[in-house]
Image (cartoon, helix red, strand yellow):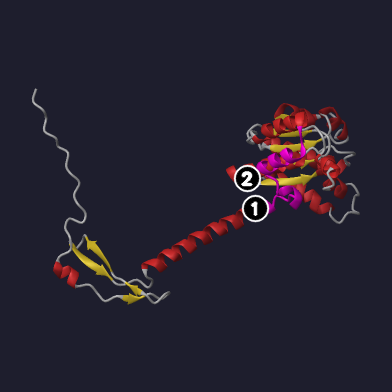
Amino acid sequence: MQARASTRQEPEAWPPRGPTPEELAERPPDGVCAECGNPSQPHLIWDAFRKRHRYLPPCRLCDACSQAVMEREHQSGEAKQRLAARSLWERAGFPDDLGRWDFDQLWDASQAWKTGDDLANWQKAWQAVKTWHGNKGALILRGPVGTGKSALAAAAAKALFRQQGIQPVYLPVPELNGALGFKNKSPNRDAARERLWSAPEAGLLIFDDLAVGKLFVDCQRYVGIAIDRAHAAGKPMIITTNASLAQMARRLERDDEHGRVTDRLAGYATEVRVEGQSFRALRRDEGVA
């Protein structure tokens, strides 16, 4: 059987030829760099339209200064992106001492302050929160005071913000409850109401200390509305609390007598128990806090 001749063509060299002595003789004189004063050389290019080499006039900057300008612009663009991201994160409303936490820092803190079964159980909770990606409805962090529930919520929100660009909003329920509970006496009443009403517009809602103590009717109403709207839109939520679902239902019953909010949370949420010794107590025992 006769072999078929190959029809493959070798790629054409580009440019098809080198510069001629006549083309090289057309080189214009060097310029002067506007930044450093060193020579700025003209550049030889192939003009495909004229099918000959020709020189571009010297640039305003030499090659070294042009490279430095591009690097500065790149760094400036990165700085602007970092500044924009920081501004968006600040809009979440986390207190400074809470918003600084991330998963790596929390892991180091647990290694520093906890031991034995207390350490193992807490790091199991840490792992469960770290692997929650916001696509599983609500995340309920339940446990005693001081065990790091709020810090874990902040770390999860920061991870989602960095990895997926999900904008969080932090809702400290006791603080909002206080502002809404005294009718028109609190100067922060309108701001608290607006914060809860507009919260579902964000990508991630964090209800910190939900159902702690007695919730006033207005706070129950606006918290319930925010949860309903986020649930209907399929948005993730993080809820920290030391109350069981039954206790939460009782504390919300004045505005949600049929337990609709807690029933929805029960079927919509992943629950993580965050138990063990209080970080604050451990730090006090060491004389740190």
Q: Give x and y (percent) for residue 104.
A: 66, 42
- Mark 1 crowd level (few <14, some 14–19, many ≥20, 10 Å Cα): some
Q: Residue at x 73, y 30 (%)?
A: 120
Q: Give x and y (percent) for residue 99.
A: 72, 48
Viewer-nearest residue: 64 or 224: 64
The residue range painted magenta reads 87-115
Q: Residue at x 80, y 32 (%)?
A: 276
Farthest top residue in view: 1
Residue picked out by circle 2: 161
Is 51 displayed left or right of 173 in the figure?
left
Tag 1: amino acid: Leu
Viewer-nearest residue: 26 or 51: 26
Q: Residue at x 51, y 60 (%)?
A: 75
Whether residue 265 appears in this view of the structure is no
Is 62 displayed left or right of 204 in the figure?
left
Whether residue 79 appears in this view of the structure is yes
Viewer-nearest residue: 210 or 34: 34
Residue picked out by circle 1: 88
Query: What is the count of numbered marks?
Result: 2
Viewer-nearest residue: 254 or 245: 245
Please tell me in which quadrant of the rendered image residue 109 appears.
Answer: top right
Tag 2: amino acid: Phe
Please tell me in which quadrant of the rendered image residue 211 appears.
Answer: top right
Q: Give x and y (percent) for residue 76.
A: 53, 61
Above or below for 62 versus 111: below
Above or below for 275 versus 166: above
